[in-house]
Image (spheres, rainbow, N blue to C red):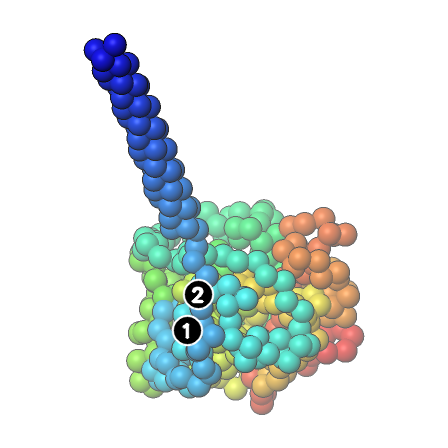
Amino acid sequence: KGNGDDVEMREKGTKRARERSFFDTYLLQTLLVGVLTFALGFYLGSARESSQPRKRDVSAMEIGEEREERGRRVTTGGQDKRRLFSLAGPVRWECLPQKAKDAFTLNGKIRVYPYFFDGDGQQGQERRTWTDNQIDELMEKAKKGDELSLGYCGASRYLLSAFTSFSVQNKQAMVIGSINPWVEALLLLCRVKTPIVTVDFNPPHANTERIKSISVTDLETMQPSPKVDVLISYSSIEHDGLGRYGDPINPEGDFAAIESMRELLKDGGLLFLSIPVGSDMLVFNAHRIYGPERLKLLTKNFEMVGLFGSRQDLKLEDLYSLPGGDGMNGDCAEEKRRNWEQPVIVLCKPPGCPPSKMRGSM
């Protein structure tokens, strides 16, 4: 009997040992699965976060820092007196300090529609080469009535109408910002004085005697600062100060840019300015749309003498009444869907301005 009891006890002990071993193994496996699941989730979450553009926390940024900005904008004499936020873009609207938002919207007078571009579209851009053959081809296309610009419907027609109505023949011309020489080709077609001066942060190699290309830095350091009869700015200043291209945030960047352009003009000189015009709106950080509030401030140091756009009888009031929408539909959209149009506004630096050809009130 004693031997039988011993056998029974050993069997029970072995059974309990097996149960404990199974239980311990189960706990270990469960623990390992939990750890691996947590680690995998953390890794995937980090990967997703790193692939998303980070929002910048700029609540501590204050207005008032003065910077000298070189690259995209034109200044004169190497001086840049614009007051900027100590912050460079691209930055999302919701991350801006309230002071910046108030300045951008003129204290609530301008509607905002966030539309965010993340990244500097100009980074890594190769330096372009312009040739006489390229320019001649563009001029021939313009003679046939073809559109020369990329992505701006009607632009060539608007500019040619403006250059004809306010003659640029034998005038010294400067083009601010140019990816390809379509504006220069139109000017040459209208017989401006050569060479045309083209200014860009990344100036092209101009293998032609008809165009002289210089950098913004070159222009800033010229002494004395050059003065021209005619200056053309197409689809540029509406982006100034929004940070879209990595530039410093500056609610008055467009005002500073146009003032720099005014300084480059002779008295009586003309600025052919093309910007989006509609109801006042800020599509941040894409562009501004100029309505009666901001356009009045933008052009206050000029006389507005001409407007050339989609119709011969076009008036600014026609454009101010366009539905704002999301602010992304311009001249290339169906007429009923347009939020804005991009006419050519002719501005003159007084004194010595020609008679105005504007229709309606300004």
Q: Nearer the viewer, residue 6 or 96?
A: 6
Q: Nearer the viewer, residue 223 or 134?
A: 223
Residue type highlighted by circle 2: Arg
Q: Nearer the viewer, residue 67 or 40?
A: 40
Which numbered disc covers residue 319? none
Residue under pointer 1: 87
Q: Residue at x 74, y 68 (%)?
A: 320
Mark 1 or 2: the one toward you = 2
> What secondary structure is marked by label 1?
loop
| Residue 262 place in picture, x, y as percent | 50, 81
Q: Residue at x 33, y 68 (%)?
A: 214
Q: Residue at x 27, y 18 (%)?
A: 9
Note whether 362 is above or below 329 in the view shown.
below
Q: Residue at x 64, y 80 (%)?
A: 107
| Residue ranking furthest to the front | 1
| Residue 192 place in picture, x, y as percent | 48, 67
Residue type highlighted by circle 1: Leu
